Image: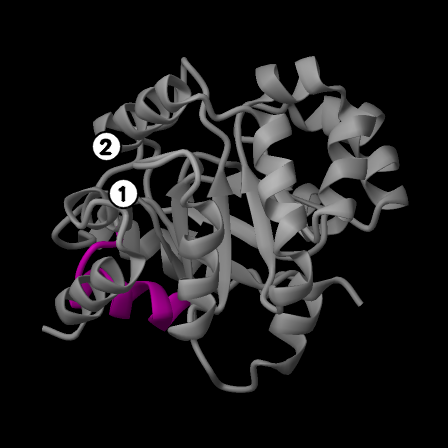
Amino acid sequence: MNKINALFENKGDKKLLSLYFCAGCPTLNGTADVILTMQRRGIDMIEVGIPFSDPLADGPVIQNAATRALKNGMTLKTLFAQLQAIKNQVEIPLVMMGYLNPILHYGIENFCRSCREAGVSGAIIPDLPFDDYLRVVKPIADRYDLRIIMLITPETSEERIRLIDAQTGGFIYMVSSAAITGAQKSFDDEKQVYFRRIDGMKLRNPRMIGFGISNAQTLKAAHNYAEGAIIGSKFVTLLNEADGDADKALENLFSVLSR
């Protein structure tokens, strides 16, 4: 069974925590240590960011991380080699997150094949049009047992959400607001109305809420309305501040989330 599906099937009442980091930042060769440290410290799922020069959905923190990673020499080929080297040690789901341009340059089929060879269970491609996903990407991804995770926002229509729910697997990524990534202190009433509305739709796929989760308050709100939460910018900031020491970054993150 795909590791993402197994995670949600076997989680029981547990609320999940997934973390994002940008591969190649702050150091080119830190990918394996960050992943294995997260796994050891109890993180349930990991989003591995593919650095790109024009990350449209991301705020300054992840933009800067991508720029630093590219300057360090990170490429998709290098990243897959790093992941393949630790494949047999990684038990939790890995999800690649990146933009369509570098994936197209690598080749859709090559990308899906490399994901399977490196033990990757899913991919999030924020700028992949849904029609292109259905027509081109889904048939290839299905052959390699790769889950393509789609994002929804407060502006996504119920019809489109139902279609995404019917045509994807793994989980649905609920973006907390139609904005770029970045930490927020709290989720206002409007966002919580959106969370309740999606919760009330009783979708087939589990949901994870991301964008803006950075403290106990936002984490609790996400856990109230979904199966789990995704933290990106806050962890990237802490990892940079710790000079790539994932243990120290996680210690600081857990401290922030418990206040």
Query: Residue 143: x, y in percent?
Result: 90, 43
Q: Give the secondary structure at mark 1.
A: helix
Residue depicted at 56% across the width and 86% down the height: 12
Q: Tag 2: residue type?
A: Val
Query: Is 202 placed above or below 188 here?
Result: below
Residue occupying image coordinates x 33% and y 46%: 232
Residue behind mark 2: 61
Q: How many marks?
A: 2
Is residue 97 shown left or right of residue 144?
A: left
- Residue occupying the point 46% across, 46% down: 31
Q: Is residue 55 above or below residue 246?
A: above
Q: Secondary structure at mark 2?
A: helix
Task: Please indicate whether residue 3 sits to the left or right of residue 199 in the image.
Answer: right
**For mark 1, does the 10 Å Cα neighbourhood hold few (<14), some (14 to 19), or many (20 or more) residues?**
many
Q: Quadrant of residue 171?
A: bottom right
Label 2 Cα neighbours within 10 Å, binned few <14 / some 14-19 / many ≥20: some
**Residue 67 marker:** none
Colour setup of the view: one colour
Cα–Cα gap, marks 1 and 2: 6 Å
Instruction: Kindly report the secondary structure that dominates the magenta region of the rendered protein.
Output: helix
Do residues under tags 1 and 2 come within 8 Å of each other at their CB atoms? yes
Q: Quadrant of the N terminus?
A: bottom right
Residue 226 in view in this figure: no
Mark 1, residue position: 233
Residue 145 appears in the figure:
yes
The answer to which of 198 and 134 lies nearer the viewer is 134
Residue reaching furthest to the bottom: 12
N-terminal of the pair, mark 1 or mark 2, is 2
Magenta segment: does it hold 65? no
> Viewed as shown, does residue 172 lie left or right of 178?
right
Residue range corresponding to the magenta coloring: 213-225
